[in-house]
């Protein structure tokens, strides 16, 4: 059964489409400007180089990424050379060139011994080579090593390594003979899919049910799904590539999107690109199915299992593509919260409030925020933004004061120039806690800046406008 897409708002950057997107190319141009001395990349930060490699891959320009990695190997700063070797290791392992991959890994280790990035890189390379027992042992060793470092909080990475030790993160490599370019192959397959079509019926006006052919396919999919421990390795891939009807199934699309969150890192094409392609298809299919059923304004409650894959896909699409001032996510957000699931089981109300405000629909945002529960601190903070955008500043000041009184850590963390990340538990947070405040800042700081409300809000409050670490 699909899980809700998360108990807390996702912290995701604006997500451009995979090909032909001018935004991606502007990002590439800006990042390339930092490395104008290629093939000698100069002294730009390693984080910028890492982002540029990812952006090349998201734009389906793997050749540019490879040329850039070759340049990084000859860069003067050690950090850039180490990064180049790390990413080269991932490239070579994904192509099945394991001797070259290990040579790059050992050089990366020599240049930057003990770098946390080496942990997942070593484990996923061992997994890709089929050395599963060694990979699990290595994951446990890295987790122990990182836990012994009191200076930095590696709790998220350690949790991921423990998960690797108990589960097989290399699900995308369990596909039998392959050319090492599986993600590119899947992307090309999705590009060739037929147009979305409705293979569903509406049961008792409130639950989606697949028609006979699609129901049969989904029954077979359940037997080979990557989440079925009894399934033969790679059986999901054969079915996904061989059954055109997979393109019309919310269940299959949602399982594939979920699998991307468990895929190994360092593929030659970004798993994010594949996630975007799947979610874009899911959104197109949502529109086609609802229009075909004349159910665009029909509630689809979460407690009906047949509705859950669609609700999860819509929520994931909204979270991935939401950005201040960007209308891309508005349609699935409005549908999810205002029509399909007004009880907000997928936890999107606060994102809808902030997105509506940033897109010039502050009055609508205010109405949505007013429907939130008293414990929904994120929507209440979004209500402040809506009032500010409407010019109702006295009401906005009062609402902000109420938020600060009820959730002081959110405000303190939001205005802090350098808040300290608290210990986090995946998928949950403590109401009123530091982890809740951190999630709000990570998700919505850009919305406050976009509205021009951050300075106003800081000046509204008594005491120092900007605190230190919290």
Image: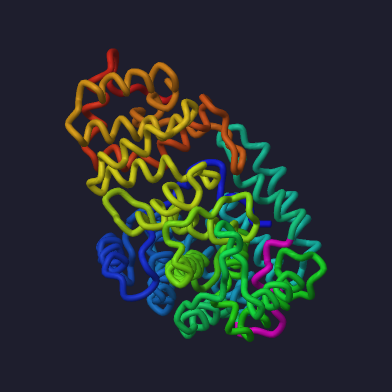
Question: Residue 41 placed where, x, y %?
Answer: 33, 64
Please tell me which residue lies in front, 57 or 87. 57
Question: Residue 67 placed where, x, y %?
Answer: 40, 76
Colour mapping: rainbow
* 174 within the magenta span: yes
- Position of residue 187 relative to residue 295, above or below, is below
- Position of residue 325 relative to residue 418, above or below, is below
Question: Residue 326 placed where, x, y %?
Answer: 29, 55
The residue at the point 56 percent across, 56 percent down is 206
Q: Where's the N terminus, which quadrant?
A: bottom right
Question: Residue 356 placed where, x, y %?
Answer: 30, 46
Asked if residue 448 lies left or right of residue 230, the reply is left
Part of the protein shown in magenta? 168-179
* 151 within the magenta span: no
The residue at the point 62 percent across, 57 percent down is 120
In the figure, residue 147 lies in which quadrant?
A: top right
């Amino acid at each position: 059964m699909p899980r809700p897409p998360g108990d807390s708002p996702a912290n995701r950057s604006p997500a451009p489409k995979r090909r032909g997107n001018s935004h991606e190319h502007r990002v590439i141009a800006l990042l390339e400007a930092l490395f104008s001395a290629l093939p000698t990349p100069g002294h730009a930060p390693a984080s910028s180089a890492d982002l540029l490699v990812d952006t090349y891959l998201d734009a389906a320009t793997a050749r540019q990424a490879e040329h850039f990695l070759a340049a990084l190997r000859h860069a003067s700063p050690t950090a850039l050379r180490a990064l180049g070797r790390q990413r080269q290791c991932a490239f070579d392992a994904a192509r099945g060139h394991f001797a070259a991959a290990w040579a790059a890994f050992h050089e990366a280790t020599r240049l930057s011994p003990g770098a946390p990035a080496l942990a997942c890189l070593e484990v996923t390379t061992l997994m890709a080579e089929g050395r599963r027992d060694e990979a699990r042992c290595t994951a446990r060793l890295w987790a122990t090593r990182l836990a012994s470092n009191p200076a930095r909080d590696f709790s998220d990475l350690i949790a991921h390594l423990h998960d690797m030790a108990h589960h097989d993160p290399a699900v995308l490599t369990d596909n039998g003979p392959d050319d090492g370019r599986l993600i590119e192959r899947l992307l090309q397959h999705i590009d060739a899919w037929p147009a979305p079509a409705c293979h569903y019926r509406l049961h008792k006006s409130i639950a989606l049910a697949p028609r006979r052919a699609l129901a049969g396919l989904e029954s077979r999919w359940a037997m080979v799904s990557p989440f079925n421990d009894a399934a033969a390795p790679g059986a999901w891939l054969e079915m996904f590539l061989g059954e055109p009807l997979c393109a019309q199934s919310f269940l299959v699309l949602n399982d594939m999107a979920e699998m991307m969150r468990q895929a190994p890192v360092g593929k030659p094409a970004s798993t994010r690109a594949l996630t975007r392609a799947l979610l874009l298809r899911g959104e197109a299919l949502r529109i086609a199915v609802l229009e075909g059923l004349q159910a665009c304004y029909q509630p689809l409650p979460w407690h009906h299992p047949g509705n859950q894959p669609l609700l999860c896909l819509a929520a994931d699409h909204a979270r991935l593509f939401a950005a201040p001032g960007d209308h891309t996510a508005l349609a699935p957000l409005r549908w999810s919260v205002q029509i399909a699931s007004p009880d907000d089981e997928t936890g999107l109300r606060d994102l809808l409030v902030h997105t509506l405000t940033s897109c010039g629909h502050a009055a609508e945002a205010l109405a949505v925020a007013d429907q939130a529960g008293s414990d929904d601190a994120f929507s209440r903070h979004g209500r402040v933004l809506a009032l500010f955008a409407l010019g109702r500043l006295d009401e906005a000041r009062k609402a902000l004061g109420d938020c600060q009184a009820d959730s002081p850590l959110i405000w303190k963390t939001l205005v802090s120039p350098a808040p300290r990340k608290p210990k986090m538990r995946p998928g949950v947070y403590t109401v009123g806690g530091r982890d809740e405040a951190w999630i709000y800042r990570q998700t919505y700081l850009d919305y406050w800046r976009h509205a021009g409300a951050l300075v106003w809000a800081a000046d509204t409050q008594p005491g120092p406008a900007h605190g230190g670490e919290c």
